Every structure is written in structure tokens, then in C-alpha cells.
Image (tube, rainbow, N blue to C red):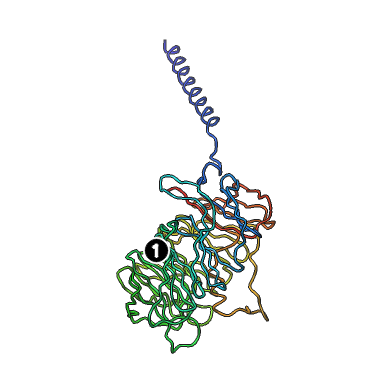
């Protein structure tokens, strides 16, 4: 009797093991790995710049959505708007600002692909140069007279809408910067006319109607270059530290730390920020990358080295990426600055700056301006980094979180560079 019971129990156990094994096999057979094409948003666009025109490509299919056969102005700089729909095209030498419409419209829970075109809208301004964008508002600082151009992105499609060029009292031409905060005020650089050179020395708030609040918070430095904002806080790079402003009308100075000082190249002169990120990331040409915490007012080193080529934040601000001269890509968590991964990546080289006797032949301002330019060979969405290959006929797709290669986009012909457009669903 006991023997029969034991055999029966073993039979039941064997049946259970067989059933579970079959279930596992079925699951493994039916579970397909998620591909790049499935996981990337349908609304991410790669705008390909070629001689004589622009191609708009849907990233996850590699298909050209539309093409516009009109060349960009020579030496124009392109910046993606907050929504991802537009490119602001800054023609500094031509004293003009134009707008390229990708036609990708973000309605939060869905999107639309409308016509790709140049907007029939231009802004004439004296030497437009520095670009900043937050909360759907673009600001371009005009070096020629210290004015700004304010663009409300939501109104660009309205035929009667004209971007507003705002001029200020008691300002002069200088290589400046500025942005709009969520409270509707602007933070703009001003120059002390007693100081030589083209860089400004102070920051002031501007009311929405253009009235200058003539108070610099008792912060005045030797020179200012570069800025970033998330709408609540904003930062300006300076010879003496980081100038911090907020939407409560405060202006203060986070003093230089460590090797940062007012000598050429050893101060934070370019900055990156994002509406969805609390931290800011500043770059000192000879010293590397620093993290700026606007709440604690801490300034700490993130990456040490004089070899940074470019840096960027992902679409929705989750990741911060640094590209160095040996083509290493370093990925950081943009919320806390923690390192995530790094890898050497084969890519098309960015042309080096001209040198004379081992030193750059450009002026300090020209070098700082060059450092601000978006990378022409790297762009990223939320999940993926797109890398222009050395042959310029392929785009390598890497997963940002581990920099693994997941896909290659084959182009029909070589392109000069690329810019991001579109959006990813939140």
C-alpha cells in the first residue's frame, strides 16, 4: 500500500515538472525581444542636413518623411525648440533669424505629421547670436545692440504673429546671453562700459513689457559667457563663478572652487540645463565638467579633463552625455550626476579649431561660441543615441543606458550633419 502511494506521488510530481517545463518553453517561444523599431517613439525625427537641402527622417523606420530643397545660410547655427517642432536658424552674419518647421506636432497623448517647410517669417536683428529656450519660449540675444528677440513658440503658426525684438535702456553692444523664466520675466546680461572687451559683467531682470529692473544683486564680475535655465532657476557662467538667478527675483554668485579661476579657459563658460532637470552642467575649457546645484548652491567637479568636445541632455532630461576627443561617450544620471556607463564609439570627426603654434587662432569669444554649438554628429532621444558614422552614409543607434549598438540606419547618400526634431511620449 505504501509503495503504491509513493509511486502515485512521484507520478504527480513528474507531471507537474513536465507541465511547468512546457509552460516555460511556450513562453520562451512566444516572447520576442523588443526591437529598436518598436521601442523608439514614432515621433522622433532626425533632420539631415545636406548640400542644397534638408531631409526629415523618421528615426525608427529610417524613412525620409519629406525633403526641402533650400540650402541653409552659410555658417548658420541651428537649435531645436522646446516642443521639438521647430529649428531656430540663427544667421549671425546676415543679421537674421529664421524658423524651420518639421511639421511634427505634439498633442501630449498623440502627434501629427504636417507639412515640412520654412516658415514665411523672418526676424531682422543686429548680430543675433546666443539662443536659449524653456517652457515654449525662445530667446535670442542680439550682440549688435544688446537687445533680445523673444519668440512664443505656440504662436509661430499664427500668420499675424511677429516675434518681439526688445531693446533696453542703458545697454550697449556686447556678446551676451539671456532667457525667460516661468514668471514671465527675463534675465539678461548687461555690460559695464568702463570694462574693456566684448563680454558683459552683470545680469539684470527685465519685466515682460521690457522694463529693466536696474539692480544686479550686487554681483559684478570680469566677464560672463553662457547660460542655462529650467524656468525656475537660471545660471550664467562667469570668470568669478556661476551667477544664479531664480523666479523670486534673486541674483547671487556661486564662487569658483578648486582650480576654477578667472584666467582664460579656466572658468565655466558654457552651460546645459533642461526644464525637467534640477541640476545644471557647466563646462570649463581646460578643466572639464562641473555640476551646479541651484538649491544647495554647490559647484562640484563631474569630469576632469581639457578634452571635452561636446555635451548634451537627452530629450526629456533623464541623461547627460559627454563626448571627449578620443570619442569616448560618458553617460550620467542628470538628476544626481552619477556615472552610468562609458564607451569609445566610432563616429565622424568634428572639425578641430584652427591652431597657430599649438594654440587656437580664434579669439576667446569665438572659442566660447564654438563650445556652445550643438554636436553635428551626435543627437539623442530618451532611450537612444544616434551617431553619424565616418562614411556619413550610416547612423549607428546605441542604447543610452549601456551604449550597446542596437541598430544601423543606412542613408541614401552622405550628409553633412544632423539635428534632432520631434518628441517622445511621456
Q: Residue at x 40, y 73 (%)?
A: 166
**Residue 218 x, y percent position in the rendering:** 34, 82
Percent of width and height locating residue 78: 54, 63
Which residue is farthest front? 160
* Number of residue marks: 1
What is the crowding at mark 1: few (fewer than 14 residues within 10 Å), some, or many (at least 20)?
Answer: many
Residue in the foreground of this view, choosing between 385 and 83: 83
Expressed as whole percent of the image width and height from the top left, the position of residue 201 reads 43, 82
Tell which residue pokes out farthest to the left in this image.
Answer: 248
Extreme-top residue of the structure: 1
> Quick one: 306 or 103, which is closer to the camera?
103
Describe the element under mark 1 as helix, strand or loop: loop
Q: Nearer the viewer, residue 64 or 204?
A: 64
Closer-to-camera residue (397/79): 79
- Residue 172 x %, y %: 44, 82
User: Which of the 4 quarters of the picture holds residue 160?
Assistant: bottom left
Image quadrant in which the N terminus is located: top left
Query: Is residue 1 rendered to the left or right of residue 378?
Result: left
Residue at 54% in and 78% down: 365
Say above or below: 29 vs 45. above
Q: Would you name the residue on which mark 1 appears?
A: 230
343 relative to 170, above or below = above
Amino acid at each position: 500500500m505504501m509503495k503504491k502511494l509513493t509511486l502515485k506521488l512521484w507520478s504527480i510530481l513528474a507531471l507537474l515538472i513536465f507541465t511547468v517545463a512546457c509552460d516555460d518553453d511556450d513562453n520562451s517561444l512566444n516572447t520576442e525581444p523588443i526591437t529598436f523599431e518598436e521601442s523608439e517613439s514614432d515621433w522622433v525625427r532626425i533632420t539631415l542636413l545636406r548640400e542644397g537641402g534638408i531631409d526629415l527622417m523618421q528615426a525608427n523606420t529610417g524613412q525620409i518623411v519629406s525633403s526641402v530643397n533650400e540650402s541653409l545660410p552659410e555658417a548658420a547655427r541651428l537649435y531645436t525648440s522646446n516642443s521639438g517642432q521647430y529649428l531656430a536658424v540663427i544667421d549671425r552674419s546676415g543679421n537674421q533669424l529664421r524658423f524651420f518647421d518639421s511639421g511634427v506636432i505634439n498633442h501630449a497623448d498623440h502627434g501629427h505629421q504636417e507639412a515640412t517647410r520654412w516658415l514665411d517669417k523672418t526676424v531682422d536683428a543686429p548680430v543675433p547670436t546666443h539662443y536659449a529656450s524653456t517652457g515654449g519660449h525662445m530667446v535670442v540675444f542680439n550682440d549688435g545692440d544688446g537687445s533680445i528677440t523673444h519668440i512664443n513658440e505656440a504662436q509661430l503658426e499664427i500668420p499675424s504673429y511677429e516675434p518681439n525684438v526688445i531693446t533696453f535702456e542703458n545697454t550697449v553692444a556686447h556678446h551676451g546671453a539671456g532667457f525667460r523664466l516661468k514668471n514671465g520675466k527675463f534675465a539678461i546680461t548687461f555690460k559695464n562700459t568702463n570694462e574693456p572687451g566684448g563680454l558683459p559683467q552683470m545680469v539684470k531682470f527685465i519685466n515682460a513689457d521690457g522694463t529693466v529692473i536696474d539692480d544686479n544683486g550686487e554681483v559684478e564680475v570680469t566677464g560672463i559667457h553662457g547660460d542655462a535655465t529650467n524656468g525656475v532657476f537660471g545660471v550664467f557662467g562667469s570668470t568669478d563663478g556661476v551667477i544664479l538667478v531664480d523666479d523670486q527675483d534673486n541674483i547671487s554668485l556661486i564662487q569658483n572652487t578648486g582650480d576654477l579661476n578667472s584666467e582664460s579657459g579656466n572658468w565655466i563658460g558654457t552651460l546645459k540645463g533642461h526644464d525637467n532637470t534640477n541640476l545644471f552642467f557647466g563646462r570649463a575649457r581646460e578643466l572639464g565638467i562641473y555640476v551646479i546645484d541651484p538649491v544647495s548652491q554647490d559647484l562640484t567637479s563631474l569630469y576632469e579633463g581639457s578634452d571635452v568636445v561636446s555635451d548634451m541632455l537627452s530629450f526629456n532630461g533623464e541623461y547627460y552625455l559627454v563626448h571627449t576627443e578620443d570619442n569616448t561617450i560618458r553617460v550620467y544620471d542628470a538628476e544626481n550626476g552619477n556615472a552610468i556607463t562609458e564607451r569609445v564609439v566610432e563616429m565622424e570627426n568634428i572639425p578641430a579649431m584652427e591652431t597657430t603654434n599649438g594654440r587656437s587662432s580664434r579669439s576667446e569669444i569665438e572659442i566660447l561660441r564654438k563650445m556652445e554649438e550643438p554636436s553635428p554628429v551626435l543627437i539623442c532621444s530618451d532611450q537612444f543615441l544616434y551617431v553619424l558614422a565616418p562614411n556619413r552614409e550610416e547612423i549607428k543607434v546605441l542604447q543610452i543606458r549601456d551604449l550597446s549598438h542596437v541598430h544601423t540606419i543606412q542613408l541614401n547618400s552622405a550628409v553633412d550633419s544632423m539635428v534632432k526634431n520631434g518628441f517622445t511620449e511621456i
